[in-house]
Image (cartoon, rainbow, N blue to C red):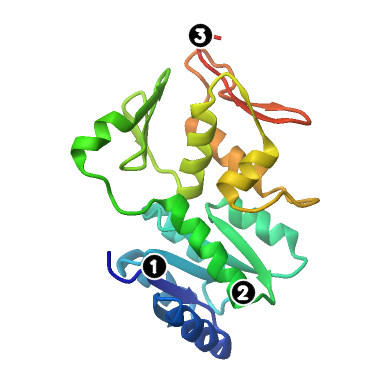
Amino acid sequence: MGMLKVLIVDDDAALGELLGEYLEQEGYAVESVRDGESGAARAVDGGFDLVVLDVMLPGLGGFDVLRRVRAVSPVPIIMLTARGEDVDRIVGLELGADDYLPKPFNPRELAARMRAVLRRAGGEPEPAIRRKARLVEVDDVTLDLGARTVWRSGEELQLTGLEFSLLEAMVRAAGEVVRRQDLYREVLGRRAASFDRSLDVHVSNLRRKLGPLPGGRERIKTVRGLGYQYVRGSA
C-alpha cells in the first residue's frame, strides 16, 4: 500500500500547517484546505483515506460539509469541536462522523485517533477467494468482513467504518449482551468516560439504518446498565 492520504479542512492556517508537518512525519500524505466548499469538493473527489474536519468554518460550516460528504461517500471523518461543546459532538456523530476531538488537542492524540479510525475502516482488501469464507449472516443481515459491506434483505447499506465495526461486534455475539466497556475498548479504541454518549449515538444511527426486524421488533436492544444485544429474529 502507498501513503495514506489525509485531508485537513480547517480555516486556522497555523494549525493546518502544524498538523500537516506532524502527520507527514508520521507517514501520511496531507492536503489542507481552509473553507467548507473546497473541503466538501475535495473530500468527495480527492480519493482521501481520511478527513479531519473542523466544525467552525467560514461559509459552508463543518456540519454542512459532513452532510454533503456523507450523502455520497463513506470516507472516515474525524470532527474537530470546541472544548465543552457537547452538542457539537453529538450532532457530528448523528450525521455520520466516525470520531471527534475537542480543541485544543495534542497532535499525537489526533494521530492515535486516526489510526484507530483507519483500522476500523479496514486495511488492505482481501483476495476474493478468501472473502466467501468471511461472510457473517444473521436473519436478513449479511456482513462481508473482507469487503466491509453490509446487506439487509439483499439491499446494500451505507455504513461508516465505525458503524460497520460496531455492527460486526454485536452480530458476532447475536443473542448475547455485549458490554458497553467492551464496545468502547474494541470498537471506539478508548475507555468509556463519564458523560460520553458517543457510543449511544452510533448505536442510534445503526438502528435507523438497519430498521426493525421483519416482524417489527427492535433489532438492537439496550440492556440497561450492561450494554447492547443484537436480537435474533427467531428468539
Q: Disc 3 vs disc 1: which is toward the camera?
A: 3
Q: Amino acid at mark 1?
A: Ala
Q: Examine the rendered structure and indicate whether residue 117 appears above or below residue 25.
A: above
Which residue matches tag 2?
56
In this image, 229 relative to 119: left or right?
A: right
Q: Farthest residue toward the left?
A: 129
Q: Secondary structure at mark 1?
A: helix
Q: Secondary structure at mark 2?
A: loop
Compare marks 2 and 3 and give the one earlier in the sequence. Answer: 2
Label 3 crowd bin: few (<14), some (14–19), many (20+), radius 10 Å: few
Compare marks 1 and 2 and give the one earlier in the sequence. Answer: 1
Q: CA distance from mark 3 to mark 1?
A: 42 Å
Q: Which quarter of the picture shows residue 39?
A: bottom left
Q: Examine the rendered structure and indicate whether residue 195 appears above or below residue 47.
A: above
x then y, percent, for residue 60: 52, 72
Q: Which quarter of the picture shows residue 134?
A: top left
Which residue matches tag 3?
234
- The residue that appears at 63% across and 47% down in the rendered structure is 185
Quadrant of image for the C terminus:
top right
Q: Examine the rendered structure and indicate whether residue 20 appears above or below residue 143.
A: below
